[in-house]
Amino acid sequence: MAVAKVQTKSNVLTDLDLNRPLLEVEDLRVEFHTRDGVAKAVNGASFSVERGETLAIVGESGCGKSVTSQAIMGILETPPARIAEGRVLFHGIDLLKLPKDTRRRTRANHVAMVFQDALSALNPVWTVGYQLAELFRQHRGMSKKDAMARSLELLDLVKIPAAKQRILEYPHQFSGGMRQRVMIAMALALDPDLLIADEPTTALDVTVQAQIMRLLKDIQVERHMGLILITHDLGVVADVADKISVMYAGRIVEQAEVHEIFARPAHPYTKALLKSIPRLDTKGQRLEIIKGLPPALTNIPPGCAFAPRCTYAQDVCRSQVPPLSTVAADRASACHFSSEVIQDV
Amino acid sequence: MGRYIIRRLLQAVLTLFLALFLLHYLTTLSIQINGNPAYAFFGAQITPTPAQLQTVSELYHTDHPCLTQPGNPCFGNFFDTMKRYAEGDFGKDLRFRPVTELVAERVPNTLRIFAVSTTVWALAGIGLGMVAAMRREKFMDYFIRLGTIVFGAVPIFLVVLGLKYVAGVWFGGWLRENLGEENALSIIFLPSFDDQHPWLTILVPGVALSVIGAAGIARLMRTSMLENLRADFVRTAKAKGLKPGRVMLAHTLRNSLIPVITLIGLSFGGALGGAVITEGLWNVRGVGQLVFNAVRQNDTPIVIAVVTMLVITFLLFSLLVDLLYAVLDPRIRYE
């Protein structure tokens, strides 16, 4: 089925190896050259996503998850950013090695992105319809009329009521949830294979959050897309994600199926994150917090970056970086004491 | 949008009325304090008889008794004046020629100088600002910023005089010696306006006049571009796989022009004032020169009439700018 879909689309990339995963990120390293020195935003992140699969990348602000997604998209400002190492394989083709113009055309056609705050992510001076139609006009060379007709279909797809009138309105005339639907419609326009959603619900009301998550999930299942959800909120992804990668200081520290993570975290950081989610059954008790702050990216300590805040830390943690290694079937953790953490409920 | 236009039109009418009244009141006050300007008609040597003075006063509408009572706003006079303006009668100069005729024959040259200078300052200002923003913290950026500070700080008459000497006398003289008097380049760099070649000889003073606007616009454009280059919607445009040129034009330049449009409106006012000086110094037979000479010859009727026309022009232009603003920025249309 996936094969047929790829062939019917007007594709930018040919020679895709469909036996390989949709996206494999291998040892990605991104640096920012700033006045205070080199900030290592991503330090060897590796993960993969299959078609029809949802991967959630979870971590605190500044842990490198947004930079990772922008590196995959190829929209980092270089300079100051620099992709120091790594590969981003799309069905086996390294996106980082593509010629500039081909790379540009992979965006929206193969990999699309939904941003956090749709009010600032949409251009205030163009109508919603214009911004949608622009994709068809620029990438497909459609006439204005055809492009608008396609845009209208998209607004219907993301369930915007009275789409026919609203298509001529400007972003500021939409509510937060409706704007995020427009963003999603825009990302889906050219039928991408992979959708990256960077904190898609953070700027929204809790009730709207669930609707948007549901919408994303439904469309993903229907189109058999790969979906990467970037979030700082484990609770939001619990029922939509298949796999979770936990990120800390630019590294993936734990990777597992969603239920495994919630049931038996294998990294002290994941464990601490889970404890800091407010729960109904612990009402009245003081919420646990993770002491201290993440390290400055210009000065990541040697050894495990989480060691200064970790209750399991020993001397070895302060000198040796723990590799991301398999701790059980389909799960990996970057901790010297992962077997202890996993048993210690 | 319709309601915004109506509101803005009503505002414009009110502003125009207030501006014209202020002008009327200042003139009235000046007559009440300085005496009847009809004396200027006779010159310093002649003392007119009361009958002669009365006749001249009637011609220039300075015969109303309220003009001898300092502080009296002379509302009656104001409405008479408005009525004459509405009929297209802007009075006569001291040599008894209708001011409208004097202005009409000079308007083409003024339009020429404005066409040249507006094109230059809009294009140069926006272009230089864009380049500076895109080459941020590089040599071109510093160079352009230095240039805008220098030209923004120098008064317009110095720029005009400097250009007159450098481009008109020094460089122009060299051209005329080497290429001959009739060469187009020699004519362009003539140190003053020539009625025979109204377009060619207007280029250099037009550029001089444009310096006022261009410096400010370049600086504002740079800031505005830098702000928008960092905007989230520019990142979205890149994520949409649009060509770099498209990202720049449709998603950065267009947004950056919004504040610049406001400044263009203000610069136009500055340019109207600058045109008086530039036309005066370059001998351009335009409306500005008319005022320039009228001020030197104490020809009050011309000064007042032309200033009134300039006020009306400026208000119309502001109206146009505000409407353009609403077209460029949909958020401005207060519904």
Image (spheres, helix red, strand yellow):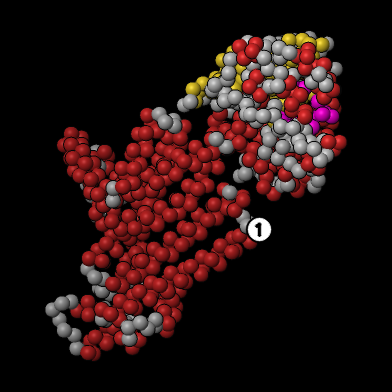
Near-viewer residue (A78 or A4)? A78
Q: Vertical placement of A85 versus A164: above or below?
A: above
Which secondary structure lies at badge 1?
Answer: loop
Q: Which residue is mark 1?
A: B335
Quadrant into which the C terminus of chain A falls: top right
Kind of residue indicated by mark 1: Glu
Quadrant into which the N terminus of chain A falls: top right
Q: Identify the chain of the residue marked 1, using the numbered disc in the image.
A: B
Near-viewer residue (B194 or A191)? A191
Residue B311 is situated, as x and y percent measured from the top left of the image, at 41, 64
Q: Estimate how packed mark 1 is, as few (under 14), some (14 to 19) or many (20 or more) residues with alpha carbons within 10 Å.
A: few
Outermost left residue = B45
Could you tell me which residue is drawn at 62 percent across and 26 percent down? A294
Could you tell me which residue is drawn at 73 percent across and 39 percent down? A180
Question: In the figure, residue B276 lies in which quadrant?
Answer: bottom left
Judge whether residue B264 can be spotted in this image: yes
Near-viewer residue (B253 or B152)? B152
* Magenta region, residue range: A230-245
Question: In the figure, residue B79 lies in which quadrant?
Answer: bottom left
Question: In the figure, residue B32 lies in which quadrant?
Answer: bottom left
Residue A149 is situated, as x and y percent measured from the top left of the image, at 75, 38
